[in-house]
Amino acid sequence: MSTSLLEAKVVRKDFGGVTAVDDVSFTIQPQQITALIGPNGAGKSTMLNMVSGLIKPTSGHIYWKGQEITQQSTHAIARLGIARTFQNVQLFGNMTALENVMVGRHIHSKGNLFTAMTRLGRIGAEEEKVRRDALHYLEMLGLTDFAATNAEDLPFGHQRLLEIARALATEPILLLLDEAASGLSTHEKQDLVKLIFRIRDTGVTIFMVDHDMELVMGISDALVVLDHGEKIAEGTPMEIQRNPRVIAAYLGEEPPNA
Amino acid sequence: MKRFIASPLFAALCGLLAIILIPECVANNYQLGVLIFIGIYTLLAVGLNLLMGYAGQVSLGHAAFFGIGAYTSGILTTQTHISPWLAILIGIIITSGVALLVGIPCLRLKGHYLAMATLGFGWIVYIVINNWKSVTQGSSGITNIPNLSIGPFQFSSDISRYYLVWGIVIIVLLLSANLVQSRVGRALRALHRSEDAAASLGVNIAWYKISVFVLSAAYASLAGSLYAHTVNYISPAPFGFIGSVEIVVMVVVGGMASIWGALIGASSITLLVEWLRALGQQNPKFQEFEIIAHGAILIIVMIFMPMGLTVGIRDSILRFFQRMQKKLAVAAKEKEQVTK
């Protein structure tokens, strides 16, 4: 267990009287694709938001390479090497695709208020480098032609890709994908799968939340299944597919031995 | 060359040329005085635009920072005889400190707490200026505020003040244009759209919101000090709630998230206010028109040109040319068919 990249220990989130995540524990192993699945309202996105620091758990702990990050702010967690996309794509709509990815280079550049205003120091060279790096990530996702297009004017499929490009620009160790396939066509989903493998092959660990079983089963190394906020199963796709509680949760039947 | 034309430096050079040439066309000192006011209000509008247009945080008390700058300059230079330049600097430091105190509790939170807090803060400052008579002279105001000077040269004539104020305006516009085209500017625009997304990319959103709030307060303080040293007299009137609304209207009219829009907004609103004032002098019936006009302008601009005058007018010109082009193309086609 000590080799895990990220570990969640009995993490719980209550919203008022509703328990969205109920004492869930799991680990994410480096260089693997781990998926968090479950029916709608199972608490998947809440769990992801807690990993990225956007919401704080009611109780429990989250460890990154053995260090506790439970109460760290989102931007500090991003600096550790955790990047993410959002279920309801959150691009900076009034900025160009290139500028969106340039924001992704934020933690790899230094310009501050003073140097930005006066253009003192090597700010010009840094700006040029940020632009070049950002173009590289656009190219990687095949978005070069849209560099100057405002993000909100891109077709939806491209918006999803741009969000991934922006997250990759932070050079993450762990990439969190929140329902990356939702709203995509079958063709686009196939491209997404190829892309996820490509990202994994560059050494990035992936933790994805999805409810598309077919997609997830085909690509993940490990799965964590949530239902009504509780973890009901954990294992390889083969194990999960045979797990009676998982089948019950998805088909809405009582588990045979319950 | 194309890159140079698109750069802020080129725009600044054009502006500089205009600033040098404009006094040649101006008939009298009254008009020169209005141009000085436009410069001062441009500083206010640019500062507020960085906060409102770029970072998406609303301040309804910006006239208070304007006032703190003006009164720091006015009080220090009339009572202690320190250099006006030093007084400007002290004003900026005090205003920044006050902005920090007001901003930290509100800007760490999401939502429009800042608008509410600055609204209340603006009232408090206005009341203090009016009632702390031993220091601020209350509603009678502070007179005989000294001119700015360099060595033996005093900025006492209108034309020298005009060049001074606009020289500073050009520098501030240039610095601001640099700022928005940078890592910091991108971070501000990003957190305006989505704080969650910006934070998830490592942008320390609380830090950037507080920084830009303090910066815009510092701009307002600079504007206030320049006001005090060019008018030589200050009273509470310009620093109240209507003053704050006026700056907001300038930003909205000029266009959110546009440095040069602030210049357009400040010019058009200052001219309008001066015109209404002139009307009021001729006919007392018009005296209360100022605040009504601000309300009406806000509504009209928001409905018809939500991006502000700068973008609104540019877009209508573009549309006009596109329509012309289409018409010409259709005419050419028809001609072709006729000849066939």
Image: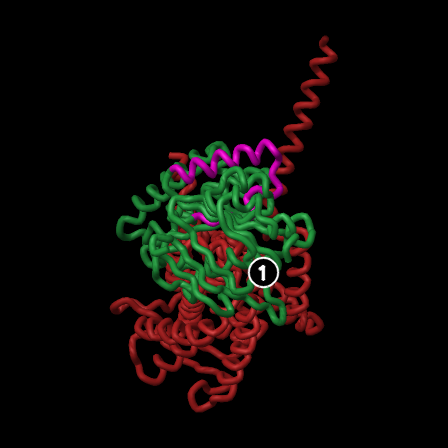
Chain colours: A green, B red
Quadrant in the picture for the N terminus of chain B: top left
Quick check: B36 left or right of A90? left
Q: Position of residue B96 (x, y in %)?
A: 39, 72
Q: Position of residue B294 (x, y in %)?
A: 64, 65
Residue most toward the bottom?
Answer: B134
Callout 1 secondary element:
loop
Total marks shown come to 1
Q: Amino acid at mark 1?
A: Gly
Q: Position of residue B169 (x, y in %)?
A: 41, 58
Asked if residue A225 is positioned above or below residue B47 in the image, the reply reads: above
Front-lying residue, A90 or B235: A90
Chain containing mark 1:
A
Asked if residue A139 is positioned above or below residue B237 in the image, the reply reads: above
As for residue A198 lying within the magenta part, the answer is yes
Front-lying residue, B168 or A126: A126
Q: Position of residue A81 (x, y in %)?
A: 38, 52
Is residue A184 in view? yes
Quadrant in the picture for the C terminus of chain B: top right
Residue labelled with disc 1:
A229
Quick check: B334 left or right of B7? right
Quarter holding residue B115: bottom right
Front-lying residue, A162 or B309: A162
Asked if residue A241 is positioned above or below residue B43 in the image, the reply reads: above
As for residue A61 lying within the magenta part, the answer is no
Quick check: A193 left or right of B97? right
Q: Who's the residue at 59% across and 43% down the image?
A: A213
The magenta segment is A175-201
Front-lying residue, B178 or B262: B178
Q: Who's the residue at 35% across and 85% down the image?
A: B79
Instruction: Tell me if mark 1 has few (under 14), some (14-19) or many (20+) residues whose alpha carbon lies within 10 angstroms of its own.
Output: many
Residue most toward the top?
Answer: B340
Quarter holding residue A189: top right
